[in-house]
Image (cartoon, rainbow, N blue to C red):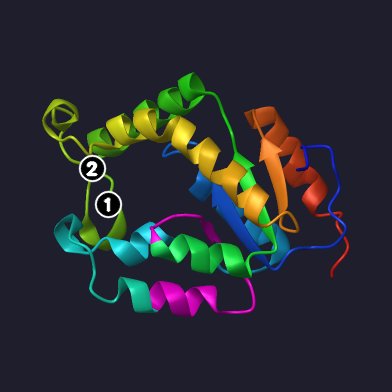
Amino acid sequence: MLGPDDRLARRPRRVLLSGPAGAGKTTVGRRIAAVLDVPYVELDALFHGPGWVPRPTFEAEAYAAADRPAWVTEWAYGRLKEHLAARADLLVWLDLSRSRVMRQLVRRTVLRRWRRETLYNGNVEPPLRTVVTDPEHIFRLAWSSHEHKRDNVRRLHERRPELTIVRLRTRAEVNRWLAGLSRVPPG
């Protein structure tokens, strides 16, 4: 497992991001994709249809995207996770503290709701009161899945020791690692 100051031997072509909701996977993923000049695949946009209803084409589209020669995406969505992990060159683990993740998530969610920001397929954040009525509210999921995400990465590392994993624990580490990524030679 590598840290923020460890240099990769070559530029990866297929990059996964792991971390709880609110850790910054989409933001970091877009930055990695820009540096590597590869597509960023937003799985949430493929999954959520209008009204937050799962899209029937999600699995076919996600598997097709995973079979492309280059991409950056989140390590998420059940069975798809194994398919993605089997094809990945690198996993970037955003292992930020629970308090940091929750601060980021609350800020992001409140701003999106206040601005009525359109997300995927016309969806907007639900009313903030749903945090107490919806057992799958993003705040609840982020809080309860924090340790589970860590365990998933550790198990993946045991199963696939050849997969390079970069563990980043702070925003400063993320920025430092991203700055060094552009200097990694092509593979």
4 sits left or right of 95 in the view: right
The residue where tag 1 is placed is 118
Q: CA distance from mark 2 to mark 1?
A: 8 Å
Q: Residue at x 50, y 55 (%)?
A: 74
Question: From which residue to which does the magenta span run?
Answer: 61-78
Quadrant in which the N terminus appears: top right
Element assignment for label 1: loop
Q: In the drawing, what numbered circle is on residue 149?
A: none
Q: Picture quarter containing residue 39?
A: bottom right
Q: In the drawing, what numbered circle is on residue 125?
A: 2
Q: Is residue 22 visible?
A: yes
185 sits left or right of 58 in the view: right
Q: Residue furthest top?
A: 99
171 sits left or right of 20 in the view: right
The percent position of residue 24, horizontal first and vertical second, equals 51, 40
Give amino acid for label 1: Thr
Most foreground residue, 179 or 61: 61
Element assignment for label 2: loop
Q: Residue at x 23, y 74 (%)?
A: 56
Residue 63 highlighted magenta (yes or no): yes
- Mark 2 or 1: the one toward you: 2
Quadrant in which the C terminus appears: bottom right
Q: Is residue 41 visible?
A: no
Q: Residue furthest left?
A: 133
Q: Residue at x 15, y 25 (%)?
A: 132
Q: Residue at x 47, y 60 (%)?
A: 81
Give amino acid for label 2: Glu
The percent position of residue 64, horizontal first and vertical second, equals 46, 80
